[in-house]
Image (spheres, rainbow, N blue to C red):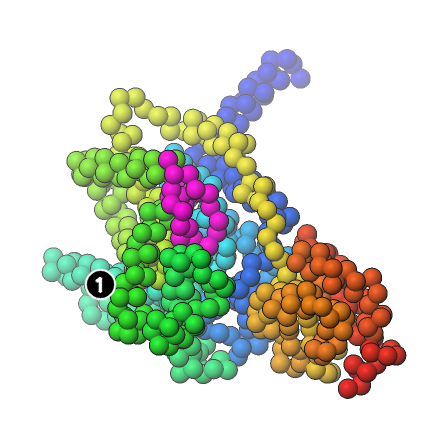
Amino acid sequence: MSFSSISAFLKKTGQSFIGMIVSPRFHWVIVSLFLLKSNWNIWENYEWAMGDAASHYASGFKAILDFARIRVSWSPLNSLYFGAFGVITGDPFLATILHRIVIVLATTLLFFGILRKLLPGVVAMAMTFWWASIPTNIAPLYTVHLFAHFANLVPVFGFLLSKTERGRGISLALVAVSALFLRNEGVACYLFLSVCLTFFELWRRKSGKGITLGRFAGSYLAPSVFVFSIWALLAAQSNTGFMGSVEAIRHKSAFNFSQNYSFTYFLQHPETEGNVWYVYDEICERDFGKGCVSVGEAMRENPEAFMNHVKTNVQGIPASVEISFFNARHTERNPDVVTTEVHRFGALSGLVLLCLLWLIGGWLVYQDRAYFLERTFRPHIFAWLCFLGFFLQAIPVATIILARTSFYLTGIAFLYLLTGLCLWACWRRLPWSLPEKGGASIAGLVLVLMIPSLWANRTQPYDAPRAVLSAVDLLRDEMKSERMTLAASVYQTREVQKFLDPEERISVKGMEFLLPALSSEIPFGERLNQEGVDYFFACGEEVVSSPGYAEFSEMPAKWGWTLDSSGTCGLVQWTLYRVVDEASGIGAQRLNR
């Protein structure tokens, strides 16, 4: 082979490589690389979150094995999705990590695909990078909120692809899926879109292009009826029955409002002692005369207290926007559960500049409305309306329920879309043109290298539920044969209890028992015997650093106990003790009583 042939081959290869890099299709690769980078090391620095995650895993795990145990009132689609990973992997921690990574990738890539349809490619990639670099957007405390955002984006994408009445009807039905099977407040967006589509078809009919009533029913009503029927069938065949499921939804709504009312009360009175999520019944009982109160009941029983709750939420909305765009806030009050830093000048300045961009960009969009109508609004009107519906739905959620960003991620995404639209409008008025292809790819690759993983420097949160479940897996057969009591270093004992079958007759004593027991003057081993504990599970700083645990772990046999097993779950080291089967003294008396 001659030198000229080699030179020609290398030149052609180089041109092909450069052509691939500058191609808009390569943007998908860049965004995927960024997502992998931003989620790298999650398996070392993420632990199973308390509360919702444990509950969804437990109910989903059971429902996959027995559909009658499905809880259609508590985001059943997410539970089944999460539980499927648990059944397939057989490992709660691995299931947690995998199901989270998959939903992060799917949600962000879907969001990027939608933005590419509605905005220029370079703006779409910029807004996707911005969105995915903010922890509260892409890594909320509970994955169910991100999963609900994914479910909301699916019908938006459906409307982008739909060119027929049937396609729009199916997309509308997908909104119903999100409302029925994930977050029930989605019914507001469903009703908004239903009205928009009805008026659209009436307008078409008036202009002589409309469809018949039968075709309207077949295209728009039939898909939604199918979705509602599936939900009704699942509810009817579940252990609670159809009416029980409906009542469970009502109770869920009241429970959610009551807990979030408690949260805003703690924001107003930070000196209040107690766990914000567990003292809601006391706070609601005092303010409304009922421990678990719905929105309507709260408005009727104590309008002043309810309006104070709304006022607190409204005051928290600017900080929520700051958190969602800048990962910081200018106020001392934190409207979100995830901790964010206070940067008074930086966050407030960013919010002011963002509002100025919306005002200037909005004015330019209006000035150039013919241009934008032709290129984005008219060809994709129902995708815009669907996004707008989710934004309108987010407003009462933020004001009446809680100004917590993960509750209305799709509403925040709509603000990102508006930000991109305003940037596009300003970009068009610049005297010079920004690079559309190669420059965007190079900038994206630089960002992939520069922006660190969201999980790189996170502190290790307290993890117990998944470690407890891993240890419990070792004892399942024994639990089915006799009643047992497990003392475990876990705060959410009810969520661990939900994971256990009724046949596995085991009760769980959590930190509310362990912390007083470890600090008691009575030796810890003796306290375990007095409480009738069969197994003691130790993990977490609160337990293993206690003098009571140190004494017990050095000489468990003194009280008739023995080390059963030990292991590591993620970054958590755990040990499991049991009362010995044959022991003299206190242990034998404990077993024979």
Residue sitting at x 42%, y 66%: 259
Q: Quadrant of residue 399?
A: bottom left
State the image coordinates of residue 282 (x, y, percent, origin top left).
43, 72
Q: Is residue 118 left or right of residue 336?
A: left
Q: Quadrant of residue 125?
A: top left
Q: Quadrant of residue 37?
A: top right
Q: Residue furthest top?
A: 3
State the image coordinates of residue 148 (x, y, percent, origin top left).
43, 59
The part of the chain drawn in magenta is 322-345
Residue sitting at x 46%, y 48%: 136
Q: Residues within 10 Å of mark 1 (few under 14, many from 20)?
A: few
Residue sitting at x 48%, y 49%: 339
> Badge 1 is on which residue?
195
Of residues 83 and 53, the one drawn nearer to the viewer in this rendering: 53
282 lies above or below 344? below
Q: Residue furthest bottom?
A: 593
State the image coordinates of residue 543 (x, y, percent, origin top left).
69, 60
- Does the magenta run of residues contain 329? yes
Picture mark count: 1
- Does the magenta run of residues contain 370? no
Residue 551 visible from this viewpoint: yes
